Image (spheres, grey):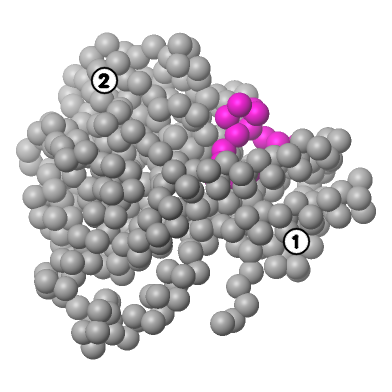
Amino acid sequence: MTNRIYNFSAGPAIMPTPVLERAQRELLSVDGCGMSVMEISHRSKRFEAILDRAENGIRDLLSVPDNYRILFLQGGATMQFSMVPINFLREGTTADYVITGAWGEKALVEARKAGTVNVVYSSANSGYRSVPDPDELSFTRDAAYIHYTSNETIEGVEFKYELDGGGIPVVCDASSNILSKRFEIDRYALIYAGAQKNIGPSGVTVVMIRDDMLERCPGGLHSLLDYRKFAENSSMPNTPNTWGIYLIGLVCEWIKSNGGVGEFERRNIEKAAILYNAIDSSDGFYSGHADRAVRSLMNVTFRLPNENLDIEFCEQAAAIGLDGLRGHRSLGGIRASIYNAFPREGVEALVQFMRDFAERKG
Ligand SMILES: *Cc1c(COP(=O)(O)O)cnc(C)c1O
């Protein structure tokens, strides 16, 4: 095998090596059929089985109830920023948005194009370091839905509880922490995730939607913006991302064979604790971005005493095989993304490097 390095990229992100190896083995002939998964009809029995594997994999790992459909769409999580309001923000209704970071902000911009939106919480003024306590939130009576982002990938801010809409449908962008821990799916009307953080490659988005929400979709929508068309046609009103769906199935099998979501939650808590401990025990050389209580298990954000040191840190880390640590361009600093597929040894290697670097420069 060629040498793999430790890839801290936020997304597209590290994939489990056994999944890549299996995909490599199966690339020329999937299930012994003499064709690549990229070469077979999406209407074939063979692909039906591949689609079922991905769907059942997610259903099984997250105990998705029977009254939810699992759909595979294209257009990324960003497409959902538009599709959610286009389907559910009716004339004369409003939607409530909880904004805890840059992705929520982007979702808000798209929702405003569709109708009236209330921002019921925003931590923008304090630099997106916090999430609201449940009792800080009050929602608009009769809101069509509430939208929030369970993990803000850029700032590294994560909800430690699942938001309760008190009867109002809750829509959640879980792109960067889906499958990283247990979710109670029945709390959501719709939950979506672009695959390239924690489930697979880019170009495919998982949507879990409760049946009654499908009935709320208005008539006359363009087919590819209509959740019902995806539900009625097993995610295939047109040609889906067959390769992406195939890899999602393999990732689900990999998670299951390693103990399931609960086991990854345990590992993720451990991995994140190692890194946050290194930050907190650096005498202020490294400073974390998020408030301690809402630090993300997936995206660990911090900075050094100045920007030049941030840059030097990333360059030197990359030189020893710790790649992708540069913070998002809007925030700067360092971001270590440590999704399910990211190994504990890589976290330990980074912490060792952090200690060495601080000793040399501190
Ligand atoms: C990456 C990300 C997105 C955007 O995903 P695309 O697939 O590029 O559209 C949206 N929300 C969150 C939370 C993300 O992490």
Image vertical order of residue 238 relative to residue 47, above or below = above
Viewer-nearest residue: 50 or 131: 50
Q: Name the amino acid, label 1.
A: Ala
**What residue range appears in magenta?**
287-301
Mark on residue 168?
2
**Image x and y of residue 264, in percent:** 48, 48
Q: Is residue 205 left or right of residue 153?
A: left
- CA distance separating discs 1 and 2: 46 Å
The answer to which quarter of the image holds residue 221 is: top left
Q: Name the amino acid, label 2.
A: Ile
- Identified at 57% across, 41% down, the residue is 269
- The answer to whether residue 250 shows anywhere in this view is yes
Image vertical order of residue 296 relative to residue 361, above or below = above
**Image x and y of residue 23, in percent:** 38, 75
Q: Which residue is mark 1?
A: 317
**Image x and y of residue 252, in percent:** 35, 58
